[in-house]
Image: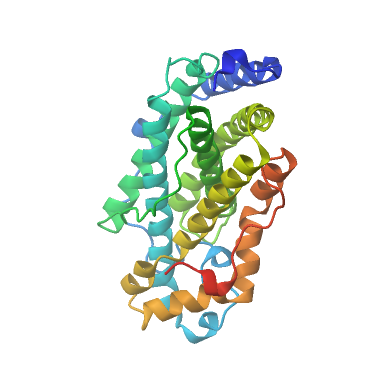
Amino acid sequence: MSTSTFIQDTSELEKTLSTLINLTNSDTYNPFKELVWPDSIESHKLWMSSSLMSIDGTRFEQELSEEQLIELSKWEFINFCSLNVTGIRELLIEMTSRLHTPGFEVLSEYLHYLIAEENEHMWYFSKFCLQYAGKIYPDRALAVASFPEADIASFMVFVRVLIFEEIVDFYNRKMGQDKILPKFIQNINWLHHLDEGRHIKYGRQYVNLACQELLNKYPKQRILEMESTIKGFMQLSVQKLYRREIFVDAGLNEPGKMRKELLAHPVRQQFNKKLIASTAKFLTQIGLFSNSSVLPEPEQVVN
């Protein structure tokens, strides 16, 4: 898919990229030098906003003790940080491989800035995990359907990155302003949000332009296959927030059973729909999705 041969006018995208580069250059904060890492994170406080925790709105809120809730919040936040590490790793690999290659002439300069920022993000999320929990949860990515068409394959990468960034930013915006959380956790969430806002702005514009190219080029059946694959990725992305190991490390009984119950709980399903609603609406508006329904019924949940 060549950005230099888009049928659609790319002038707005180019203006956006220029603006974002200027904004990035004006932000001189360097987390490698300026983040002050505390010796420890307050163990008597929640590490994740209660409204974002996997048990919010379920019986476990009342059944778990305060100590158990705090311990669970620690591992939920470590899982969140780990998802950032593994998600950014894929982003860096995919974006770097496209720098200064045919079709990415318009994007390449901005991608240098994006890659630099994402490297910073991966560093501080990984450092948090290792310094305060002693581990990073490994990625348990399941196979996602691949497409032989080069333009579709590249498009799918950019869509996956956008979905990942929008899910993460949903959490960042809340935790970055939650005064109940330890100050350092607030800070790194808000720091990440400030950068991700720029990445999402460019990502949506680029995905929209690229999508229109594919809609004009491929038959409806191929577009439906892309829709199905992307929705499957969104489902898996949500389910990773309920990782079984979270409940194991929190010392809770029957972690697998607990996970299944949470994924099937109507309050949690409502939260999950809210989490991806904006992204699903956007992908429907640009014509990629035939409808904005994404999440499966409880019996379809992947263990």
User: How is the model colour-coded?
Assistant: rainbow
Looking at this rendering, what residue extends furthest in the right direction?
A: 285
In this rendering, position of residue 225 left or right of residue 116: right
Looking at the rendered structure, the number of numbered marks drawn on it comes to 0
Q: Position of residue 16 (x, y in %)?
A: 65, 21
Q: Quadrant of the N terminus?
A: top right
Which residue is painted at 70% across and 19% down in the image?
8
* 210 or 277: nearer the viewer: 210
Write the residue at 61% across / 69% down: 269
Answer yes or no: is residue 168 visible: yes
Q: Residue at x 70, y 53 (%)?
A: 292
Residue 176 x, y percent position in the rendering: 55, 50
Considering only vertical position in the picture, is 146 above or below 255?
Answer: above
Q: In the image, is 296 to the left or to the right of 254?
A: right
Residue 160: x and y in percent read: 51, 42
Name the one closer to the observer, 164 or 70.
164
For the C terminus, the image quarter is bottom left
Is 241 situated left or right of 10 in this image? left
Location of residue 62 with respect to 160 vertically, above or below: below
Q: Residue furthest left?
A: 134
- Residue 150 at x, y percent in the picture: 47, 28
Name the residue at 55% across, 39% down: 159
Residue 172 in sight from this viewpoint: no
